[in-house]
Amino acid sequence: MKKIFIFILAIGFCLAGFQSLGQVSQGTQSAGLTFSWEDRDIVGERNNTVDNFRISPSYAYFIKDKLSIIGEVSYYKRNTGSSYSDQSLNGLAFEYEIKEVDVFMGLRRYIEVQPKLFLTGTYGLNYHWNETYVEQMQQGDRSNSLQTARNVGLFGNLGLAYFPHEKFSFELIFLDARFFRIYNKRRFYNESNTTKYQGWGFELAGFLNQPSLGLRYFF
């Protein structure tokens, strides 16, 4: 109920006080906010809890009609816990805490599908920082590890923007791809050694598996 209240309150702030006419034409500016969450419990042979939250403010300036320069900062946090009821596993349990920060700068193209509906394509440079903390418990023994990763590379995504009013739009990103350079470091708390890894990576992901909403105000 608390999340629903925050969700409604955020929409109220975004809809209040619109004073100018928004459009996807040269010289227009826009400010956006995207957030998503997931909170669920799974009970069975493996009891699993998941709590995700992401918030992403952004700014864009249209250098041409239907083409803007856009920058965004995104913060993501995920807490996951797993425990096994099978006695043969001796009370095995895991806890994960993941924190991520993404920063990107690129171009966004708007392609009109209908008068109020646009397909959006965004591409540019992306910096990604990730920290993963893992704690494992089995037979009373506890072990911990901490892994950090920094990725720098190219990204692209596809989405939809719907304009119920000229001054603002609702946005949904449904496909994201990244090609990046990996700088990875992992350290176990019960060991003094640190493992480092560098390489290249490619990711392709969809985001329709959890609630998400993007709001953009044009001025």
Image (tube, grey):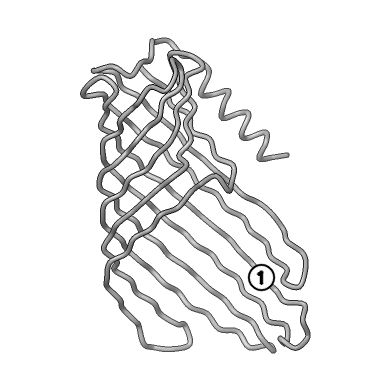
Under circle 1, the secondary element is strand
Most extreme residue toward the front, as rendered? 113
Q: Quadrant of residue 56?
A: top left
Front residue of this view, candidates 110 and 138: 110
Residue tagged 1: 82
Describe residue 124's horizontal placement relative to residue 208 as left or right.
Answer: left
Front residue of this view, candidates 121 and 191: 121
* Residue ID at (31%, 22%): 29
Amino acid identity at mark 1: Ser
* Residue ID at (38%, 15%): 22
Q: Quadrant of residue 80?
A: bottom right
Quadrant assignment for the N terminus: top right
- Residue 86 location in percent, x, y? 77, 81
Quadrant assignment for the C terminus: top left
- Residue 95 location in percent, x, y? 60, 71
Front residue of this view, candidates 190 and 112: 112
Q: Quadrant of residue 185?
A: bottom left
Q: Is residue 98 above or below residue 82?
A: above
